[in-house]
Image (cartoon, helix red, strand yellow):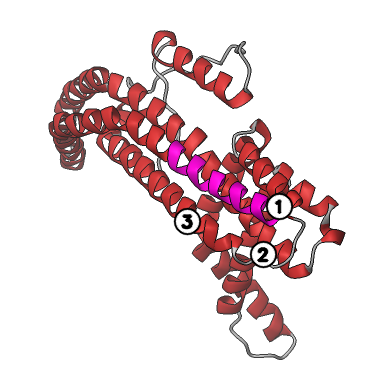
Amino acid sequence: MYRRLRFRTRSLVVAPFLMLSAVLCGCSASMPEPEVASSATEPGYAQDYPATVEQIVKDFGRDDDDAQTLAIGLSVYAKDLKAPDWKLVADVYRSANDAGRSRAYVDRYAEVEGARVFFSEEQGEIAKKVGGWASYACMQKGADADLRGTVSRSLSELVSKRLEERLRERNAAHAMINRHRHELTKEDAVALEVLADQISRASYLVHIAMVKTQIRMRAVLEEAEQVKKTLDDYIAEERAIGGKSDKEADKIGSEARIERATQVKARIDGVLSHGRTMEQKMEPRIAAAQKRHKDALDALLADAEKRK
């Protein structure tokens, strides 16, 4: 999953991220951001460039779709509330919305998402080894059981639960729910927790994630010419290196690397055109997503106000 931020130069990246910092912090003055060097001069990064642009487009579309689904579903989740204190409910709604844009939530979301991706990709191998150890321990005690499937399911449930809990630790709306839990039925407390999760995530997607992806796209698009040069240099160097070896295996390997780099370079212009077209659409799509989220939240608040 290509969720890494790539930066090019101070003029390209630092200024946009200073603007984003002000949005995240809700303040007029911005703290200096670290300058992270571009990887466009690295052959490995250059060969992944088309896939990187394509993944950014997918990430943006996925977040927009998820935010839309959440906005539509908020009123449905609210129907699960039976007889709560509606003033408290409205306060939780507002707190959850603010939390989704807060530094504490944003940082923890990145941590949780990274852990989720890692476990998703490595779950099979982890479960295989842990399940194997558990099965072996049972065999040592005379029991013949293959526990790998059970271990895999248990690990998945445990990790998902812990990640949810860790994200909630940085959500002020959940702190509010916990303080007033004695005033809520068990069912209303659970329903309000789910609503807080959904509102915070929707707020995060439309105010933070989609904006960061837009900035990332701009930075990556600006790297295109350097990426092409990097690939040209890499191909030339590879030809020179391959020509110095008398071993057939070395020549075959060199030719394969040249072929891959050549194919990647041939894709760049097409990917670049699509990426630029999508980047131009991102600003209005972000504005539409933010309005959609605000409208859904306003409807929830209006409903809570009527029920007070």
Amino acid under disc 1: Val
Is 250 above or below relative to 82?
above
Amino acid under disc 3: Glu
**Residue at image coords 33%, 44%:** 58
The N terminus, quarter of image: top left
Question: Between disc 3 and disc 1, whose residue precedes?
Answer: 1
> Pointer 1 and pointer 2: residues touching (CB < 8 Å)?
yes
Q: Secondary structure at mark 2?
A: loop
Q: Which residue is label 1 attached to?
A: 89
Is 269 above or below relative to 100?
above
Q: Which residue is label 2 attached to?
A: 81
User: What stretch of residues is rendered in magenta?
Assistant: 290-308
**Residue at image coords 59%, 34%:** 101
Residue 121 marker? 3
**Residue at image coords 28%, 24%:** 221
> Around disc 2, counting alpha carbons within 10 Å, would you say few (fewer than 14), some (14 to 19), or many (20 or more)?
some
> Pointer 2 and pointer 3: residues touching (CB < 8 Å)?
no
> Around disc 3, counting alpha carbons within 10 Å, would you say few (fewer than 14), some (14 to 19), or many (20 or more)?
few
Q: Secondary structure at mark 3?
A: helix
> Around disc 1, counting alpha carbons within 10 Å, would you say few (fewer than 14), some (14 to 19), or many (20 or more)?
many
Residue 85: in magenta span: no
Towards the viewer: 143 or 275:
275
Is 123 above or below relative to 229?
below
Inter-mark Cα distance, 3 to 1: 38 Å
Amino acid under disc 2: Leu
Inter-mark Cα distance, 1 to 2: 9 Å
Q: Position of residue 75 (x, y in %)?
A: 53, 58
**Residue at image coords 22%, 25%:** 231
Q: Position of residue 206 (x, y in %)?
A: 47, 38
Q: Secondary structure at mark 1?
A: helix
Q: Is residue 114 visible?
A: no
